[in-house]
Amino acid sequence: MIRKGEKLYSVLCQKCPRCHEGNMFSHPVWSPRFADMNKNCPVCGLDFIQEPSYYFGAMYFSYAIQVAVFVLVYLLLRYTTNPDTWTYVLYMVLGAVVILPLNFRISRAAWINLFISYKTR
């Protein structure tokens, strides 16, 4: 069970990496505005936008998550139905689109957690 104070809690719940209380994003994950981030943590005031282009490195996390989705879709299709190539492509693209909002958020949360540590009050 993950608990407050662990980096995994901050990443999976998309909470501030310093206080683990404030939300990093201003809208729910499945809303059309899923990418809108709070500028600062509403609880401790941490600046989530550290510098211009700060989150470019989050693409590495996003890539890893997407590869995991592709492998999972491949294995599920391969060992349940053994379809043709275009079915693989269709389901992988569908999986990528469905997971996009969560992938975006988890990648950014993981990236900022590499550089900011949890501090108890």
Image (cartoon, rainbow, N blue to C red):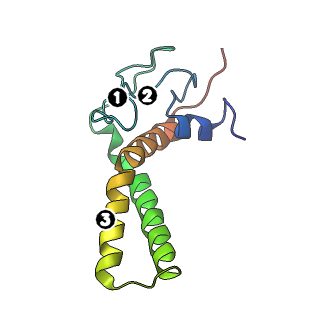
Q: How crowded is mark 2: few (under 14 residues within 10 Å), some or many (20 or more)?
A: many
Residue 79's x, y, as percent?
Answer: 53, 81
For marks 2 and 1 on the same chain, the one whose residue lies earlier in the sequence? 2
Question: Which residue appears at 31% of the width and 65% of the height?
Answer: 93
For marks 3 and 1 on the same chain, the one whose residue lies earlier in the sequence? 1
Q: Quick one: SS at disc 1?
A: loop
Residue reaching furthest right?
1
Q: Distance between the residues labelled 2 and 1?
A: 6 Å
Q: Name the residue under label 2.
A: 24
Residue 71's x, y, as percent?
Answer: 47, 71
Q: Residues within 10 Å of mark 3 (few under 14, many from 20)?
A: some
Q: Circles 2 and 1: CB distance less than 8 Å?
A: yes
23 sits to left or right of 27: right
The amino acid beneath tag 2 is Met
Q: Quick one: SS at disc 2?
A: loop
Residue 65's x, y, as percent?
Answer: 45, 57
Q: How far apart are marks 3 and 1 (CA)?
A: 26 Å
Quadrant the N terminus occupies: top right
Q: Name the residue under label 1.
A: 37
The amino acid beneath tag 1 is Met
Q: Mark 3 points at which residue?
A: 93
Question: Which residue appears at 45% of the width and 69% of the height?
Answer: 73
User: In the displayed structure, would residue 72 be above or below residue 59?
Assistant: below
The amino acid beneath tag 3 is Val
User: In the displayed structure, would residue 34 be above or below residue 99?
Assistant: above
User: In the displayed structure, would residue 62 be above or below residue 36?
Assistant: below
Residue reaching furthest front?
81
Quadrant the C terminus occupies: top right
